[in-house]
Image (cartoon, grey):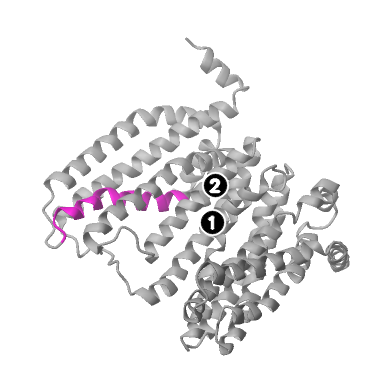
Amino acid sequence: MSRVWWAALRRELTLIWRAPADMVQPLFFFVVVVSLFPLGLSPKPELLALVAPGAVWVAALLAVMLSLDGLFRRDQESGALDQMLTAPVLSVVPVSAKLLAHWLLTGLPLALVAPLLGYMMQLPVAVLGTLMMSVLLGTPTLTVVGAIGAALTVGLNRGGILLAVLVLPLYIPVLVFGAGVVRTAQDGLPTDGLLAVLGAILALALSLGPLAVALGLRISAGD
Amino acid sequence: MWKTIKRWYHQLGSPVYFYRFSSAVLPWLLPISLVLLAVGLAWGLAWAPVERYQGDSYRIIYIHVPASSGALMGYIAMGVAGLVALVWRMKMAEVMLKALAPFGAVLAAVSLVTGALWGKPTWGTYWQWDARMTSMLILLFLYLGIIALQSAIRDPRQAARAASLLAMVGVINVVIVKYSVEWLQTLHQGSTLKVIGESSIDDAMKWPLLISMLGLWLLYAANVLMRARTEVLNRERRAGWVRKLVNRP
């Protein structure tokens, strides 16, 4: 079982590594969207610091969502997805490896870049660590929950916009808590409790999410 | 008691039995719901006493509260139907899930509109990002997501199963959204909405509210039964009993 998992993980990482555009584009999207805010609002530092938590978080969750649209599509077109579902292992095994690989190469870079963008948005330096921590704890949830939507829409032609309609309402708790943590840190209040809630949501998503993704893939394949 | 429930569950799982059962129930359910709704609304809108602080504007409660509770219950019912459909592969649960969505979405929209109209004279604004209003807006989004997903998938069984999974995830989401906005969004703006508890409403105002609430719930149930009957006929159109039913003069 674990050998299959490692093999699946290596396959996913190799695939993404050989087509680095898939990995770089969400990151690029993230940076571009956040830099639109100072241009559109006004470069006033106090205003930017006020909207920064929400702006960074909205950009991050859009980046994750857009990157998920192709998560299963290529495997479906090549037939690898059907192999995955008919293989004599639980489909959760390769699915969870796939999710981990996707997060490592899209969610994690977002978290690493977030402090830089926070700084550009005039967030105080003391808050940047909290911002990174919140994105680090929030993006895996976004990946797993979004993958449920991607699994359900994999066979449909107009996946993109439908995926957004299905998934964005499900992202709201992460957005509220994620941006809330940063705002709380800006106010100088302790953030442990809210970070713990983000962690709790992550634990829930990690324990039930991969099962739901696997089930969604089987539903899309017509059982 | 338990045995009766189990027998009901199995009988209503059969499309033929469900069709016959609903044919017997609907002619009663629909008129009763309409009469209750008419009595509750007329009583509430015309005869219930005027509220001390809000004057007549509070009367929108007789539409607002039934619609909100109906929308919330409808979504939870969809989550339960989704669970039954996925775990026991019960066809009627899939049908029910599909039938529950449209009226529920309409109720969520009615709740938002009446809430906005009520908010203007009492709070001075049509919209505020208050915890309850935000939750209801998300609920409307979730309803629309279910409807969108169902209409995007052509095969009815696959569409229903996909919607089942989404509804179950959605129910978990609604609970988390409710707490997230209660803890964080109200932190910055103070609570603007006071929940009317059972004890703080006078009997003369409570009874018309309860009657119109019951009326609307029954109307929802009748709507679900009617939609489910259409869906059953469509799905079973090749079955012998449907052909016999349709060919009968």
Which residue range is magenta in the image? B54-75
Q: Callout 1 environment at 10 Å: few (<14), some (14 to 19), or many (20+)? A: many
Closer-to-camera residue (A88/B55):
B55
- Residue B150 in the image: state x and y as whole percent: 58, 41
Q: Nearer the viewer, residue A129 or B180?
A: A129
Mark 2 vs mark 1, CA separation in Å: 9 Å
Instruction: Give the label on residue A102, or none.
Output: none
Residue B87 in view of the camera: no
Of residue A152 and residue B6, the one placed in the foreground of this image is A152
Instruction: Identify the residue at image location x=62%, y=36%.
Output: B156
Please give the name of the residue rendered at 24% of the width and 46% of the height, measured from the top-left corner.
Answer: B211
| Residue sitting at x 40%, y 44% | B106
Both labels 2 and 1 in a single chain: yes
Q: Main secondary structure of the magenta part?
A: helix
Mark 1, secondary structure of its residue: helix
Would residue B173 appear left or right of B215 to someone viewing this image?
A: right
Proximity of marks 2 and 1: CB atoms separated by less than 8 Å? yes
Q: Is residue B58 magenta?
A: yes
**Left or right of B27 on screen, residue A187:** right
Indicate the amino acid at tag 2: Ile
Q: Amino acid at mark 1?
A: Gly
**Disc assigned to residue B170:** 1
Identify the residue position indicated by label 2 in the image: B146
Q: Is A182 above or below relative to A75?
A: below
**Residue A193 image offset from top left, x and y in percent:** 51, 83
Classify residue B28 by image quadrant: top left
Give the residue displayed 11% in from the left and 53% down from the top.
Answer: B49
Q: Secondary structure at mark 2?
A: helix
Q: Chain of mark 2?
A: B
